[in-house]
Image (cartoon, helix red, strand yellow):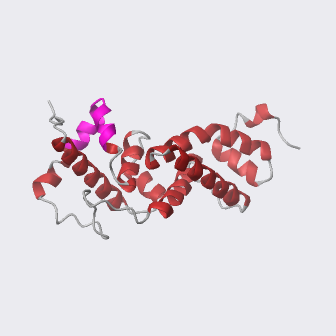
Amino acid sequence: MKDSMETLTALTDEELAVRYMNGDNEAFELLLKHNQSKLFTYIFYIVRDEEKANDFFQDTFIKIITKLQDGMYSPSGKFLAWCMRIAHNVIMDEYRNERSSKIVEPTEDNDLSNLKVDSVQETNKEIEFVNSQVLKDVKKMMNKLPASQREVVYMRFFQQMSFKEIAATTNVSINTSLGRMRYAVLNMRRMAREHGINLDLY
């Protein structure tokens, strides 16, 4: 016998996902209600286009439903992080070949040897800036970053995810996640310099 909606609302998303895999369709209605806004915000922040974001959102939820119906979710991790991982794969499949000649991109093995040592040493100060300032100008610069770098910045500073969690969600190593953050900060520093925005700490 199915539980009432009131009983279902007391369950975590992870428990609701298990209920849906066991055939409780009402559980999925709650999962959708709990997560659709956060998931769409994540997708929109990466692609910066409402029409594309809607398409990716629909594709993502089709995959989420399919994977749940196939019993492919394990409640050992947070449900939203699992959904974000699926969304990440959907987006990256589309943008895998996205490149920009003006943006510094890491090599396949995430080698930072082509960068000046002093630039890398300054990264921590720059990250502190991103973490402590109002972010109005920084947000504008984030929007100009490649999808992979914009994504890690979003997860780190807007979702407060650890680099371990970011690595798991985006299916890369922790070093690659850290490298993407370094390149994102270096790119934002370059853009700030070009537009006369002062990023000095006080």
Image: magenta residue range: 126-141
Q: Is residue 72 above or below residue 81?
A: below
Q: Where is residue 188 shown, x and y percent of the image?
A: 25, 46
- The C terminus lies in quadrant: top left
Q: Residue furthest bottom?
A: 108
Q: Is residue 148 visible?
A: yes
| Magenta span contains residue 194 | no
Q: Is residue 74 above or below residue 40?
A: below
Residue 37 left/right relative to 179: right
- The N terminus lies in quadrant: top right
- Total numbered labels: 0
Q: Residue at image x 28%, y 34%? A: 137
Residue 158 left/right relative to 66: left
Q: Residue at image x 20%, y 41%? A: 192
Q: Nearer the viewer, residue 81 or 114?
A: 114
Q: Where is residue 37 shown, x and y percent of the image?
A: 58, 38
| Magenta span contains residue 128 | yes
Q: Main secondary structure of the magenta part?
A: helix
Residue 152 left/right relative to 119: right
Residue 175 left/right relative to 97: left
Q: Residue at image x 16%, y 65%? A: 114
Q: Where is residue 55 shown, x and y percent of the image?
A: 59, 51
Q: Is residue 70 above or below residue 3?
A: below
Q: Residue furthest front?
A: 51
Q: Residue furthest right?
A: 1
Q: Where is residue 25 shown, x and y percent of the image?
A: 79, 46
Q: Is residue 77 visible?
A: no
Q: Is residue 35 above or below residue 67?
A: above
Q: Which quadrant would residue 180 be assigned to in this image?
A: bottom left
Q: Nearer the viewer, residue 75 or 185?
A: 185
Q: Residue at image x 15%, y 48%? A: 122
